[in-house]
């Protein structure tokens, strides 16, 4: 079974440019998360989706970040304009939740590493 | 605000030794406490998890000890191997279906 797929794996842009990251979760996983991981730090939640609804976006800097999950499957995270401090790894994770005996485990993708020059 | 505090930041253990990583949390409503393992260039992967109704859970060489009254939990890696060298994150959430609050991570190096 395929895991969580993210692209691109690496992206280098100049400040003030836009950037977008794409995530394809594990098939059947209704819950999708975007996390930000700075170097040497733990992941920090940006946004959580239940199907196509963003149920927790309190940590998403809405002045420059946006996200969408069309049809409750794939998701994109966009930054416009990017700032130097946005350099980090953006992790996508998905979960089947806890219904039906599922454990609620989060499965992470390999991340998209952004460098803003 | 860091809801989960993890220590040490880094750890060096000889092969065959015991690795111990500690975490403390503040929110008494948390009821799901997983540990994630992350190798360079990879996403975190679930290692082992515990709920507060038990004080200990063991899976192979990995054991979680949980102290509800102290709001602390720890990961013990017995017979540590070089292949265990990775970054370990403790986390906590209101439920296993909710977003995780991660600690800052512990970089473990197991020397041959």
Image (cartoon, coloured by chain):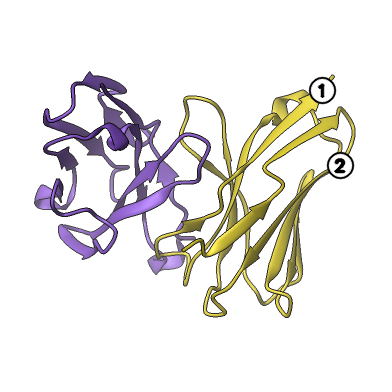
Chain colours: A purple, B yellow
**Dot label at residue B44:** none
The secondary element bearing badge 1 is classed as strand
Q: Secondary structure at mark 2?
A: loop
At x 45% / y 59%, what residue is drawn? Answer: B100
Q: Which residue is mark 2?
A: B18
Snapshot quadrant of residue B9: top right
- Specify whether disc 1 shares its chain with disc 2: yes
Percent of width and height locating residue B48: 64, 52
- The reply, left or right, for residue A104 in relation to residue A77 is right
Disc 1 to disc 2, how far (Cα)?
Answer: 12 Å
Q: Quadrant of residue A1?
A: top left
Q: Which residue is mark 1?
A: B111
User: Which image quarter: residue A11?
Assistant: top left
What residue is drawn where x is 70% and y is 76%? B68
Camera-side residue: B73 or A49? B73
Earlier along the polypeptide chain: callout 1 or callout 2? 2
Q: Which corner quadrant holds the C terminus of chain B? A: top right
Instruction: Give percent across and percent down for residue B34.
Output: 58, 56
Marks 1,2: beta carbons within 8 A: no
Q: State which chain disc 1 sits on.
A: B
Q: Residues within 10 Å of mark 1 (few under 14, many from 20)?
A: some
Check disc 2: other Cα within 10 Å, few if <14, some if 14-19, many if 20+.
some
Question: Residue at coordinates 71% horizontally, 25% vertically from top-left?
Answer: B83
Q: x and y percent of residue B64 in the render?
A: 73, 58
The relative height of residue A74 versus residue B53 in the rendered view (above or below) is above
């Amino acid at each position: 079974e395929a895991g969580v797929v993210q692209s691109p794996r690496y992206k280098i842009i100049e400040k003030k440019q836009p950037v977008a990251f794409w995530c394809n979760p594990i098939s059947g996983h209704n819950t999708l998360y975007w996390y930000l991981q700075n170097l040497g730090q733990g992941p920090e939640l940006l946004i959580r989706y239940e199907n196509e609804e963003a149920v927790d976006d309190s940590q998403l800097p809405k002045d420059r970040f946006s996200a969408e999950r069309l049809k409750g499957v794939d998701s994109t995270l966009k930054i416009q304009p990017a700032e130097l401090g946005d350099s980090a790894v953006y992790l996508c994770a998905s979960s089947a939740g806890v219904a039906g005996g599922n454990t609620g485990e989060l499965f992470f993708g390999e991340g998209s590493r952004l460098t803003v020059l | 605000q860091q809801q989960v505090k993890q220590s040490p930041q880094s750890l060096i253990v000889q092969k065959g030794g015991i690795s111990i990583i500690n975490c403390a949390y503040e929110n008494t409503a948390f009821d799901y406490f997983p540990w994630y393992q992350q190798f360079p260039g990879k996403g975190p992967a679930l290692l082992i998890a515990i709920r507060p109704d038990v004080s200990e859970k063991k899976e192979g060489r990995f054991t979680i000890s949980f102290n509800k009254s102290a709001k602390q939990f720890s990961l013990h890696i017995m017979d540590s191997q070089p292949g265990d060298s990775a970054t370990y994150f403790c986390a906590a959430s209101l439920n296993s279906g909710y977003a995780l609050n991660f600690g800052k991570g512990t970089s473990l190096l197991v020397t041959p």
